[in-house]
Amino acid sequence: MRFSTRGRYGVQIMLDLALHNAEGPISLKSVAERQKLSENYLEQLVPELRKAGLVKSVRGSQGGYVLAKQPEDINIGDVIRVLEGPIAPVECTNQTGTDCCEKTQFCVTREVWVKVSDSINNVVDSISLADLLKAAEKEDGQMMNIFEE
Amino acid sequence: MRFSTRGRYGVQIMLDLALHNAEGPISLKSVAERQKLSENYLEQLVPELRKAGLVKSVRGSQGGYVLAKQPEDINIGDVIRVLEGPIAPVECTNQTGTDCCEKTQFCVTREVWVKVSDSINNVVDSISLADLLKAAEKEDGQMMNIFEE
DNA sequence: TGATATCCTACTAAACCAATCGGAATTTGT
DNA sequence: ACAAATTCCGATTGGTTTAGTAGGATATCA
């Protein structure tokens, strides 16, 4: 049971943008360098975040991307769903009622996948970009301590 | 974010075995027919459930599979993990501490995946085969009512 | 002995993933 | 006006995974 790299990279990108939010448009090149990801590949991902209204783009030289909302108003769930598609552990999870299958037993097991899917959504929707920012700052502090010892 | 068919079929198989638990060994052929799945494909999955101690096999004519434990002692999480591998939404989720990545930001995002993974495991480990049995009986009852109306 | 099973391994077509590539359009700075 | 930087867009590709097929060896029952 895996997310693809898309969701993971997406969260990394958004956090990177959040960390440099004050510096104006951030180029994908710099994100790719810091995060050690392929710029070309990110180029494929970020437009989807833009179309979803999570980032804004500035074209041309000195252009780049900025968050479209405040970090506390962006949750990780949106980022993941944009890039990974709906969180449906099996195909019929988010279909309605009986139109997904004829087998009684399957529809019983369907309850399992619905619960799993609800639980994942709850977790990722309860984490905002601001939460990650806080964690990142804290972690930096700990790093410092380690290095200073 | 998807499970493969392996986990889904696995739960279907186990529930099917549970529903026919009193009838002695159940052949994969009959499971495949009832669940409308490929017998050959199931033949690939069920031995893994056997090696994991979830079912027992009886070889030869009139042979088949039976649950290795009582339905209330088998949880869905075990079934899924056997067939799908560990529930780790991204690669480093279940690695320890710092040996997975050098990037601070990535390790911050790692917390997200750990929480997701914990949450999924909690859900699937809280559902036993006996729970699904109960749900299946109830659903059958409802079906009956619908048909009798 | 024959039918019915599990068991085991190899193979395959299709889909998906992660990444690469090439080039068009847009904007900034000189 | 021009060059550099950058987003934008679509096509292509190599590799892996998925879902299923196929064939035969082994075991058991009637």
Image (cartoon, coloured by chain):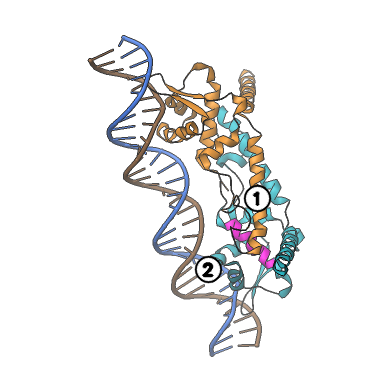
Chain colours: A orange, B cyan, C blue, D brown
Q: Amino acid at mark 2?
A: Asn
Query: B143 above or below D26?
Result: above
In the picture of the structure, the residue carrying the numbered disc 1 is: A114
Is residue B148 in the magenta section?
A: no
Chain of the residue where label 1 is placed in the rendered structure = A
Q: Is residue A131 left or right of residue A20?
A: right
Q: Main secondary structure of the magenta part?
A: helix
Residue under the point 68% across and 67% down:
B17
Foreground residue among A81 and B108: A81
Magenta extent: B6-17
Quadrant for residue B116, please give it. top right
Query: Do tags 1 and 2 sit on the same chain?
Result: no
Q: Is residue B145 left or right of residue D4?
A: right
Q: Amino acid at mark 1?
A: Val
Q: Position of residue B104 (x, y in %)?
A: 57, 27
Q: Position of residue B122 (x, y in %)?
A: 71, 46
Question: Could you say whether the residue bearing mark 2 is in a helix, strand or loop?
Answer: helix
Query: A94 above or below B39?
Result: above
Query: B57 above or below C24?
Result: below
Mark pair 1, 2: CA separation: 28 Å
In the picture of the structure, the residue carrying the numbered disc 2 is: B40
Q: Is residue A84 left or right of residue A58?
A: right
Question: Could you say whether the residue bearing mark 1 is in a helix, strand or loop?
Answer: helix
Foreground residue among B51 and B18: B18
Residue B8 shows in the view? yes
Q: How many residues crowd mark 2 within 10 Å: few (<14), some (14–19), many (20+)?
A: few
Residue under the point 55% across and 24% down:
A18
Q: Residue furthest front?
A: B149
Q: Nearer the viewer, mark 1 or mark 2?
A: 1
The dot on residue B106 is: none
Q: Position of residue B149 (x, y in %)?
A: 72, 67
Chain of the residue where label 2 is placed in the rendered structure = B
